[in-house]
Structure formats: structure tokens, C-alpha cells
Image (cartoon, helix red, strand yellow):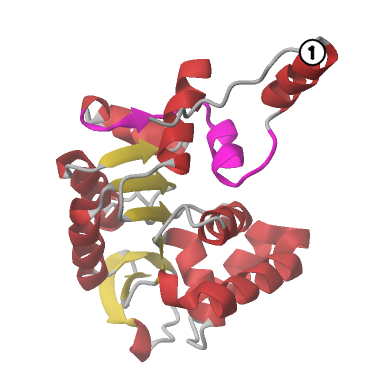
Amino acid sequence: MAHEIRQIDQALESPMRPCIAVLGGIKVDDSIEVAHNMLENNIADEVWFTGGVANLAIHLSGNNIGEGNVSFLQNELQGAWESTVESATALLEQHGDKIVLPTDVAANVEENRIDIKVENLPIHAPLFDMGLASIFALSSRIKSAGTIILNGPAGVFELPDFALGTIEMLNACAESNGYAVMGGGHTATLVSKRGLADKMGHVSTGGGACLDYIAGRTLPGIEALEISAQRYQLEITPLIQDE
């Protein structure tokens, strides 16, 4: 665990530039918190949103994603809906110039993939992936980045027609010369299943702990060690040493 924290810490404290964060999945509130931390502390130069968090950001940017897609997000967030919307709105206002949203999306229309430009929304069908133009743009940016911190799928990857965005962004990370950090949970599982783990800089085994760490939250284990060090008057040495 200490080795894993050291690797992630290095990517956060002294990333090769440009450093981009690619945040997706359906844990929208967590992704917003991660984006806040990475932009407020100048960790990431850009944040690219995919998946559910992209749908919310598109909606808050003034594009009607359709009542069904809004209702889905509200159902997922439950009591955290209002606070997440408030936090996401503030994020877009404060750091909108560093946040990249999809320009097109893929809707599930009667089990068929239909790509549609964001400007042509709404569509009365669920949004399940990024569109082809957005997938190409994200893949290109990943390949030119010095550090990539990725957490969460780009869409409903369980359905073959809507796995393209997730597959291509993982392939781009594997092909990039940059240092790619893969978050835990679904992201780590997908990387492993596709046989790409050895082509990444780091694949987290910490699941939610990785998400907590890049969101700037205190990890209980680290907090306990710091308290113990203070109690026994031990010197705490930073993981990242100046050359």
C-alpha cells in the first residue's frame, strides 16, 4: 500500500506536463470533488469529463440532455443531487476554461447507437457514451499528455455498442508515452481484462481509496500513521524528495 501511495503521490505532486484528468463513471459527486481538488491545486492542466459527470456538466452548461437523462442522474444521486449541482455549477464557473466536455454523445435508440452533436440535443433516449468526434479528440489528447489520471468508464461499457469510448481511451493510455495512473474499481478491472495493465504507469488496487486520495480526502490509514508519528515525536518525511 505504501508503494501504491508513493506512485500516486508522485503523479499528483510533480506530474509531467501537460497533466490531464479524465473523469467518468456514474459517481458524479465524487468526480466533481476530484476535479475541484485537481484544478484548485494546479495538479491537472485540464479535466476531461465523460460518462455521467459529462452528462451533468453538459446539462448545467445550458444544453437540454432530455428529461429521462436528468431523472436518471437525480435518481443516482438521491439526496446529494442539489449539493452536487451546486458544486458542479461553481466548478464550471471557476474553471470552465480548463474543463473539456464532449461535443457529441451516443444515444441508445431502441438498442441502436445513434451519435448526436450536443448542440442538437435533446433526444428522448438515454445517453450511453461519447460520440465518435469526442472519442477521437480525447484519444489524441491522452497521447500527447505527460501525465494521465483516469478514473471511471466513458459510458455503459457493458453493452458492446456503447463500450467504444471506454475502450479507446484505455487504448490511448496504453499507447501514450505519458505516465498513466488508472483509478481503482471498474477502471482497474477493465484495464486488467483487456490485458493493458503492464502498459500503464500505475493501476490502483485501492478501489475507492484511490478516488478518495485524488479528491484530496484524508485516508484513515494515513491519518492514523500521522497521529502516531506525532504522539511518538517521529519525523514525517515527504514521499516526494527534492532533487
Figure quadrant of residue 208? top right
Q: Horizontally, is 128 left or right of 67 in the view?
A: left
Q: Position of residue 52 (x, y in %)?
A: 49, 62
Tell me where the magenta segment starts and ends, as one range: 199-218
Q: Position of residue 29 (x, y in %)?
A: 63, 57
Q: Position of residue 235 (x, y in %)?
A: 68, 16
- The answer to whether any part of residue 184 appears in the image is no
Q: Horizontally, is 60 left or right of 152 in the view?
A: right
Residue at the location (18% across, 52% down)?
Answer: 143
Which amino acid type is marked by label 1? Answer: Gln
Q: Quick check: 226 above or below 33?
A: above
Q: Which residue is the extreme one toward the front? A: 243
- Is residue 185 covered in magenta? no
Q: Quick check: 203 above or below 82?
A: above
Number of marks drawn: 1
The quarter of the image holding the C terminus is top left
Q: Horizontally, is 70 left or right of 23 in the view?
A: right
Q: Which residue is mark 1?
A: 233
Q: Position of residue 38 (x, y in %)?
A: 52, 54
